[in-house]
Image (cartoon, rainbow, N blue to C red):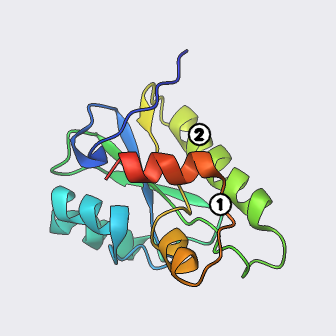
């Protein structure tokens, strides 16, 4: 088993599954979530609505529809400073639960975005709060 870090458009990756960093409504609201929903087509949102949302740290799986990936695994990352000090555990849960779903569905290749570093990181940067590790920020900048 290998791990590879790549920059680029997750919606074009040839992995069996891609991970979507979404909100609790799984609505395709912005960032990677919006890009995945646009690329997958309207059937993705319809399936997401049937799943009744996703809580922070949890993961849910859908079909990939118009994506090269057969599956999309949706997870909700923590909002730093708003999770009662549980941010690290919830972020770890995102990755663990996505990998568990991949295992349960016999998925051998999976692509992750940098979870909880996108829009939230940008908002914190604008407020002068730099709480994310530098490696995550560099990854986000390179993958745009």
Question: Which residue occupies 47% across, 25% down?
Answer: 4
Q: Looking at the picture, does residue 31 appear above or below residue 134?
A: below
Between residues 122 and 15, which one lies in front from this camera angle?
A: 122
Q: Which residue is mark 2?
A: 99
Rendered location of residue 39, percent (x, y):
17, 57
**Residue at the right extreme?**
85
Dot placed on the residue nearer the N-terminal end, 1 or 2: 2
Between residues 53 and 21, which one lies in front from this camera angle?
A: 21
Question: Which residue occupies 46% across, 31% down?
Answer: 5
**Residue at the top extreme?**
1
Query: Split into 4 quadrants, where in the image is the N terminus?
Result: top right
* Apparent side of residue 110 relative to residue 31 in the rendered image (left or right): right
Between residues 15 and 42, which one lies in front from this camera angle?
A: 15
Between residues 23 and 119, which one lies in front from this camera angle?
A: 119
Question: Which residue occupies 62% across, 41% down?
Answer: 100
Q: Looking at the picture, does residue 56 appear above or below residue 65?
A: below
On the question of residue 137 being in view, the answer is: yes
Mark closer to the observer (1, 2): 1
Rendered location of residue 113, percent (x, y):
45, 49
Q: What secondary structure is found at the residue carrying circle 1?
A: loop
Question: What crowding class fits label 2: few (fewer than 14 Cα within 10 Å), some (14-19), or many (20 or more)?
Answer: some
Q: What secondary structure is found at the residue carrying circle 2?
A: helix
Q: Which residue is mark 1?
A: 132
- Dots 1 and 2: beta carbons under 8 Å? no
């Amino acid at each position: 088993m290998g791990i590879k870090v790549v920059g680029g458009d997750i919606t074009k990756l040839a992995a069996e599954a891609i991970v979507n960093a979404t909100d609790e409504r799984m609505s395709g609201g912005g960032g990677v979530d919006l890009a995945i929903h646009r690329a997958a087509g309207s059937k993705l949102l319809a399936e997401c609505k049937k799943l009744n949302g996703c809580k922070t740290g949890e993961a849910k799986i859908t079909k990939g529809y118009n994506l090269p990936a057969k599956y999309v695994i949706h997870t909700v990352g923590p909002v730093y400073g708003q999770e009662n000090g549980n941010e690290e555990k919830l972020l770890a849960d995102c990755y663990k639960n996505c990998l568990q779903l991949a295992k349960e569905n016999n998925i051998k290749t999976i692509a992750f975005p940098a979870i909880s570093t996108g829009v939230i990181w940008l908002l914190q940067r604008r407020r002068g709060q730099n709480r994310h590790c530098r490696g995550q920020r560099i990854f986000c900048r390179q993958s745009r």
